[in-house]
Image: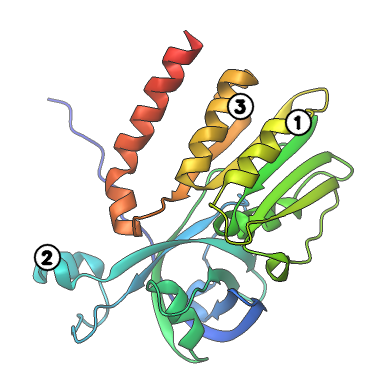
Amino acid sequence: MATEPARRRPKLNRGTVLRTERVTPHMIRVVLGGGTLAGFGAGEFTDHYVKLLFPQPGVDYPEPFDMERVRAELPRDQWPSVRTYTVRAWDPEAAELAIDFVHHGDKGIAGPWAARVRPGEEIFFNGPGGAYAPSADADWHLLAGDESALPAIAASLERIPEGAPTRVFIEVAGPEEEQSLTTPGDAEIVWLHRDGGPVGDLLAEAVQKLDFPEGRVHAFVHGEAGFVKTLRRHLRVDRGLPMDQLSISGYWRQGRDEDGWQSSKRDWNRQVEEEEAKALS
C-alpha cells in the first residue's frame, strides 16, 4: 500500500522587535531581528509572507514555544491567533525583516500590536511562503491592489527589470496614505483615493479601462476578495489572459476576520473558478 509523504512542518521563527516606524498615518513598519533569523530564507519572491502568532491573553504556553505541543496539549480556543502578513523587505546581511501593518485604531489584532509594540519584545511566526516575482520574460507588468497588497507591490517594483513598462494602480484611503516607491522599471504609478467610498471600486474601474500595451503581460492583483474576483473575471474572460500570466488572490474579505476568511476561502475560490469556466466555455 502506498504511503503519503510526510507533511512538512512549517518553520517556526522567533523575531525580536528592533524598531518601528510610522510610514503613513495608517501604516506602521515593524522591523524584526535576532540570531534565529540568520537563515530566514526570503528573497526568491516579492510576495513572501509570514504567519504571525499572537498569544491569547492569560494563556501559559510551553517553554520552549512549540506549536505542535500547543495543539496537542491546549484546547483550540487557547491556541495563538494567526495573522498573515507580507514581507516588505528582508536584509540577509543584517538579518532584518520589515513587515508593514495597516492600523485602524483598536480594531483587529495585528494592527494594534504594531502600534503598541516596543523594541526588545519578541514574536513567533512561520514562513516564509510566497510564489510571485516579476517575470524577466514579460513585455510589460501590471500591479494592482489595495493597502494590504501595497508591501508586495512596493517590493515587486524594486525587482521589475530595468526599463520594463509597468502599470501600477494602488487604492488607499486618501492622499495621506501614498508612499514613495522606487523601481528600475518604466513605471506609471496611479494612486486611487477612496475618500470613504467602497473598497476596490476605483481600482476595478481603473484596470478595466486600461489600454493594455502590446505584448505579454505579467499581472499581480491582490487585496480585498470582492474586487479581486471582479478583476480576475475581467483579466481571464474579457482580456483572455491565461493563469500562468497572473498572480491573483484575495488577501482578505470585507466582513470577515482572517480566521473566517481562511475557513471559507477554498469554497470561495472554487465558486469563482466554476463561474469563470462557464464564461470561458
- Locate the N terminus and report the quarter of the image it occupies: top left
Q: Which numbered disc, 3 or 1, marks the residue that appears first in the sequence?
A: 1
Observer-side mark, 2 or 3, equals 3
Q: For mark 2, what is the residue? A: 72
Relative vertical location of residue 16 with respect to residue 26 in this rendering, above or below: below
Q: Kindly indicate the quadrant of the structure image that contains residue 93.
A: bottom right
CB atoms of marks 3 and 1 within 8 Å: no
State the image coordinates of residue 130 (x, y, percent, origin top left).
52, 49
* Residue count near mark 2 (Cα–Cα under 10 Å), binned few <14, some 14–19, many ≥20: few
Three-letter code, disc 2: Ala
Q: Secondary structure at mark 3?
A: helix
Q: For mark 3, what is the residue? A: 235
Determine if residue 253 is in view. yes
Determine if residue 133 is in view. no
State the image coordinates of residue 159 (x, y, percent, origin top left).
75, 50
Q: Residue at x 58, y 54 (%)?
A: 149
Q: For mark 1, what is the residue? A: 138
Q: Residue at x 84, y 47 (%)?
A: 187
Q: Which numbered disc, 2 or 3, marks the residue that appears first in the sequence?
A: 2
Relative vertical location of residue 263 with respect to residue 87 in this rendering, above or below: above
State the image coordinates of residue 91 (x, y, percent, origin top left).
66, 69
Three-letter code, disc 3: Leu
Left or right for 2, reference 108: left
